[in-house]
C-alpha cells in the first residue's frame, strides 16, 4: 500500500512566549543598574550604618560567631537592605534634604528610574509587536489547492500511485516546475509522439470495425478519433510556434517552459479521451471472447487479398513513370513496393496464427495476432496508394507546366525563368520539381511594374497547391510506415505543412502553399535521419518482427515484438498482451 502523502499543513515552530522574551530583555538591559560594583555597595552599607539603619558588617560577623540575637539582627538588616524601592523612597523622603543620607537616596532613585524607563519602552515595543503578529496570524490563509504548487487542483482525482514511486516523484517534480529543461523537452516530445501514434492506430482499427459493422455503429468512436486528431494537430502547431529548443547552455524563457507543460497536459487529455472509449470499442468488436473473431478475420483476409493483387499493378505503374520522367520524380516512393511486400509477409504470418489460435480455443491470442495483421495490412494500403497517387500527380503536373510558365512570365518576366524553360525543353524532367521551381521564382522575385495581380484563373496557385499536397502526402506515407522510429521534429514540421496547406487553399495564397511544400520536404528529411539512426542502433529491420516494430505495428518490448497497437490511448493501446513465442519464420502465404 503506498504511503499517503503528508498534509500540506505543517506544525508551526514552537516560539518563546512574548512576555518571557520581554522580561529577559529587560533583565539584560537593567543588569548594570541592579548590580553596582562591590566598592559602591560597601560605601552604601557603611553610610547606612552611620545613620543607624544597619549595623557594621564586622560587628555583625563578630556577633554572628557567637550566635543568638546576632542572627536575628542580620536577618533584620538584610530585610531592610532589600526592601522594595518604593519603601526605601518613603524613608528617604522623611530625611532632611541637605543630609548625606538624602544625597545617597537621590542617587538610589536615579539608579532605579533608568531601568524603569528602559523597561517601559521595551514593554511598549513588545506589545506593539505582539498586536501585529496576532493580526497577521488571524488573516493568514493556509496554502492549499491552487496556492500550493504540489497540491492537486480542486475537485481533481488524486494521481494513482505507481509501484516504486518513480512516476509519482516525476509528476511531483513536474508540478513544482523543477524538472530540468532538457528532461522536460524530451518528455513533451515523447508525449506528443505517443499521442500521434495513438491517433494513427485508433484510426486503423476503426477502419476495420467500420468495414464490419457500418459507419452508423462506430460514429461515436469516429467522433472521438477526430477530436483527438484535431487536438494533436493543435498541440503540434503550439510546439511549432514556440520555436526550436534553445541551444545547449542557453536558459529557456518562462514562455517555452509553460508551452512544454501545456503540451504534456494536452497530450494526457488526448490519451484519456481515447482510453475511455477502448472498453466500449472492445465490446463492439468482441474479439477477446472469441465471438467476433471469425467475422473479423474474414474482413481482414478480404482486404489482404485485394492489396496482394494491387501490389503487382502498382509495381508496373512505378516502372512506367520511372521510364517516362527523370529519376528524381520517383524518389519519394522508392522502396515502397519492397516495404509493402515485407508487410504482406508479416500479415500473412499473423493472420494464420490468429486463425490457428482461435481454432485451439485461445481467443485472446487470436485477437492479438489479428490486430497485428490489421496494422500491417493498413500500412500496405497506404504504401500502394502512395505509388498510384504519385503517378496521377506527375501526369497532372506535366499537363500544368505550360500554363504555369505563362502565369509566371506575366508576373516576373521571361528572363527569370529562361534557364529553367530550356532545361524542360531538353527532355525528360521531374514535373513536380519544375512546378516547384517556377512557383518559387514567381513568388519570391520582384514582380514587373505592369504585372496584373493574380486572379481566380491564375495558374500559379493550383500549381503551388499540387506540389505542396504531393510533398505532404509523401512525407505522411513515410512517417506512417516508419513511425516506430520517427521523432517529434519531423512530425511537428509535417503537421505545420498540413496547416499551411489548408490555409493556402482557403485564402488562395500560393506563398503559403510554397512554404507548406518546404516544410513537408524538411519533415521527410528529418524522418529519414531518424530511421537511419534507428537502424544504426538496432540493425537492419526485415519484413518480420523487426520491420513491424519499426513501422509501429508492434510496440516492441520482446523477442516477439511486443503487443500490437490497438484502438485507445497510451494506457490501453498495448492491452492485447504479448506472447512469448520466438521470432517467427515465414509460414507461407494465404491462398488468394
Image: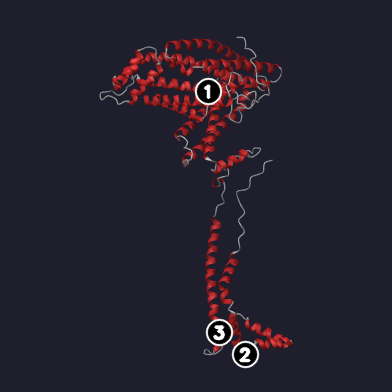
Q: Position of residue 94 (x, y in %)?
A: 56, 88
**Colour scheme:** secondary structure
Q: Position of residue 372 (x, y in %)?
A: 61, 21
Mark seen at residue 155: none
Tell me the quadrant of the picture where the N terminus can be found: top right
Res 542 quadrant in image? top right
In front of the other: 148 or 210 = 148
Q: Tell me which numbered mark, 1 or 2, is placed earlier along the sequence.
A: 2
Q: What separation in Å lies between label 2 and label 3 (alpha carbons)?
A: 15 Å
Q: Name the secondary structure under disc 3.
A: helix
Res 206 quadrant in image? top right
Q: Is residue 398 visible?
A: yes
Q: What separation in Å lies between label 1 and label 2 (alpha carbons)?
A: 115 Å
Q: What separation in Å lies between label 3 and label 1 (alpha carbons)?
A: 105 Å
Mark seen at residue 480: 1
Mark 3 closeness class: few <14, some 14–19, many ≥20 residues within 10 Å: many
- Is the Cβ of the residue at disc 1 closer than 8 Å to that at disc 2? no
Q: Which residue is mark 3?
A: 105
Q: Position of residue 29 (x, y in %)?
A: 55, 71
Res 509 quadrant in image? top left
Residue, x 50% and y 24% (percent of image)? 528
Mark 2 closeness class: few <14, some 14–19, many ≥20 residues within 10 Å: few
Residue, x 70% and y 16% (percent of image)? 359
From this viewpoint, which residue is outermost toward the left?
450
Mark 1 closeness class: few <14, some 14–19, many ≥20 residues within 10 Å: many
Q: Is residue 156 visible?
A: no
Please tell me how many numbered marks the rendered image carries. 3
Amino acid at each position: 500500500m503506498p504511503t499517503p502523502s503528508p498534509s500540506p499543513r505543517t506544525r508551526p515552530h514552537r516560539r518563546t512566549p512574548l512576555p518571557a522574551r520581554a522580561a529577559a530583555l529587560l533583565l539584560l538591559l537593567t543588569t548594570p543598574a541592579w548590580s553596582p560594583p562591590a566598592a559602591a555597595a560597601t560605601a552604601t552599607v557603611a553610610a547606612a550604618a552611620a545613620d543607624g539603619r544597619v549595623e557594621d558588617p564586622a560587628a555583625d560577623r563578630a556577633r554572628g560567631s557567637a550566635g543568638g540575637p546576632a542572627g536575628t539582627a542580620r536577618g533584620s538588616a538584610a530585610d531592610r537592605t532589600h526592601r522594595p524601592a518604593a519603601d526605601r523612597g518613603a524613608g528617604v523622603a522623611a530625611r532632611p534634604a541637605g543630609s548625606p543620607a538624602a544625597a545617597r537616596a537621590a542617587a538610589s532613585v536615579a539608579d532605579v528610574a533608568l531601568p524603569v524607563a528602559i523597561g517601559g519602552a521595551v514593554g511598549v515595543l513588545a506589545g506593539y509587536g505582539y498586536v501585529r503578529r496576532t493580526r497577521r496570524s488571524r488573516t493568514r490563509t493556509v496554502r492549499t489547492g491552487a496556492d500550493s504548487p504540489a497540491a492537486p487542483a480542486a475537485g481533481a482525482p488524486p494521481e494513482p500511485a505507481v509501484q516504486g514511486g518513480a512516476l509519482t516523484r516525476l509528476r511531483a517534480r513536474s508540478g513544482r516546475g523543477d524538472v530540468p529543461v532538457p528532461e522536460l523537452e524530451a518528455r513533451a516530445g515523447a508525449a506528443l509522439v505517443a499521442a500521434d501514434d495513438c491517433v494513427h492506430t485508433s484510426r486503423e482499427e476503426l477502419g476495420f470495425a467500420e468495414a464490419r459493422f457500418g459507419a452508423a455503429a462506430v460514429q461515436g468512436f469516429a467522433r472521438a478519433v477526430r477530436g483527438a486528431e484535431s487536438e494533436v494537430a493543435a498541440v503540434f502547431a503550439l510546439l511549432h510556434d514556440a520555436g526550436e529548443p534553445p541551444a545547449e547552455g542557453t536558459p529557456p524563457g518562462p514562455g517555452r517552459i509553460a508551452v512544454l507543460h501545456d503540451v504534456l497536459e494536452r497530450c494526457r487529455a488526448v490519451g484519456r479521451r481515447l482510453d475511455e472509449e477502448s472498453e466500449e470499442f472492445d465490446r463492439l468488436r468482441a474479439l477477446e471472447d472469441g465471438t467476433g473473431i471469425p467475422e473479423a478475420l474474414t474482413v481482414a483476409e478480404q482486404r489482404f487479398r485485394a492489396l496482394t493483387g494491387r501490389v503487382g499493378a502498382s509495381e508496373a505503374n512505378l516502372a512506367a513513370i520511372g521510364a517516362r520522367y527523370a529519376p528524381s520524380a520517383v524518389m519519394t516512393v522508392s522502396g515502397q513496393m519492397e516495404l509493402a511486400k515485407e508487410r504482406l509477409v508479416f500479415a500473412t504470418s499473423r493472420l494464420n496464427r490468429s486463425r490457428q489460435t482461435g481454432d485451439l480455443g485461445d481467443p485472446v491470442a487470436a485477437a492479438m495476432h489479428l490486430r497485428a495483421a490489421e496494422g500491417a495490412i493498413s500500412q500496405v494500403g497506404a504504401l500502394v496508394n502512395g505509388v498510384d497517387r504519385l503517378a496521377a500527380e506527375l501526369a497532372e503536373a506535366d499537363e500544368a507546366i505550360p500554363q504555369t510558365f505563362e502565369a509566371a512570365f506575366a508576373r516576373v518576366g521571361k528572363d527569370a525563368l529562361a534557364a529553367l524553360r530550356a532545361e524542360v525543353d531538353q527532355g525528360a524532367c521531374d514535373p513536380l520539381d519544375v512546378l516547384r521551381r517556377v512557383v518559387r521564382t514567381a513568388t519570391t522575385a520582384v514582380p514587373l511594374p505592369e504585372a496584373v495581380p493574380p486572379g481566380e484563373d491564375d495558374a500559379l496557385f493550383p500549381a503551388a497547391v499540387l506540389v505542396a499536397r504531393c510533398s505532404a502526402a509523401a512525407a505522411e506515407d513515410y512517417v506512417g510506415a516508419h513511425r516506430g522510429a520517427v521523432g517529434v521534429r519531423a512530425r511537428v514540421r509535417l503537421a505545420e505543412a498540413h496547416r499551411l496547406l489548408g490555409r493556402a487553399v482557403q485564402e488562395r495564397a500560393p506563398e503559403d502553399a510554397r512554404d507548406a511544400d518546404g516544410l513537408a520536404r524538411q519533415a521527410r528529411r528529418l524522418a529519414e535521419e531518424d530511421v537511419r539512426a534507428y537502424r544504426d542502433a538496432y540493425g537492419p529491420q526485415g519484413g518480420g518482427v523487426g520491420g513491424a516494430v519499426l513501422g509501429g505495428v508492434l510496440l516492441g518490448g520482446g523477442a516477439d515484438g511486443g503487443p500490437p497497437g490497438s484502438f485507445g490511448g497510451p494506457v490501453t493501446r498495448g492491452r492485447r498482451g504479448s506472447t512469448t513465442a520466438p521470432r517467427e519464420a515465414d509460414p507461407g502465404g494465404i491462398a488468394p
